[in-house]
Amino acid sequence: MTREMMRTAVLGWSFTVALLGAVLGQNTSYEPDPHWQAPADAAARGNPLAHKPQAAAGGKKLFLRNCTECHGEDGTGIVKKHAADLQLPVVQSQSDGALFWKITNGNPDRGMPSFSRLPELQRWQLVLYLRTLQSAGPRSR
């Protein structure tokens, strides 16, 4: 085997291992809790920071501090935590008010803690940041 062929093989294996690690760590089997629905009045709330997209940077800091343990740095969810993949359309299609309500109240039946201890504007910042986690393209499920 030539040096070039060996280098190509090593690169191929490295890519395969990295891809496999990402897929195995991602919660591709996430199914939302059908009973965890925001009340209509909560879901209808608008994000007071919607016209301040720069506030998402603060939301990212909050996410990294409070959410990555279960949702991972990219929001795809950690399998062993049974955490939601926040990039999925089923999550991203929810209203800002619904996401805010879920962050605020949590879902103890699924292991999602309440973050009501965070100031209200910080929870809205988290919602803004969650919107940046949208998948770059369709993924097979």
Image (cartoon, rainbow, N blue to C red):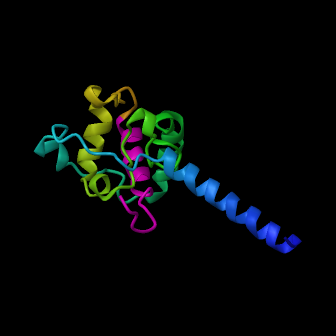
Q: Is residue 112 left or right of residue 55?
A: left
Q: How many marks?
A: 0
> Which range of residues does the magenta coloring cover?
120-141
Does 29 appear above or below 69?
below
Q: Residue 131, how many percent across, how many down? A: 39, 56
Task: Between residue 47 and residue 16, name the one nearer to us.
Answer: 16
Magenta residue check for 132 = yes
Q: Residue at x 44, y 56 (%)?
A: 133
Q: Residue 98, how many percent across, how many down? A: 23, 46
User: Which quadrant of the structure image shows residue 53?
Assistant: bottom left
Q: Is residue 12 left or right of residue 21?
A: right
Does 14 appear above or below 78?
below
Position of the C terminus, as image quadrant, is: bottom left
Q: Residue at x 40, y 63 (%)?
A: 139
Does 115 appear above or below 121?
above
Magenta residue check for 129 = yes
Q: Residue 8, how many percent across, how many down? A: 76, 70
User: Which quadrant of the structure image shows residue 2?
Assistant: bottom right
Task: Between residue 82 and residue 24, name the one nearer to us.
Answer: 24
Q: Residue at x 31, y 50 (%)?
A: 48
Position of the N terminus, as image quadrant, is: bottom right
Task: Point out the residue furthest to the front here.
Answer: 1
Q: Residue 29, how many percent across, how many down? A: 35, 47
Task: Between residue 43 and residue 87, name the one nearer to us.
Answer: 87
Task: Point out the residue furthest to the left here.
Answer: 40
Q: Residue at x 42, y 33 (%)?
A: 81
Q: Is residue 64 left or right of residue 18?
A: left
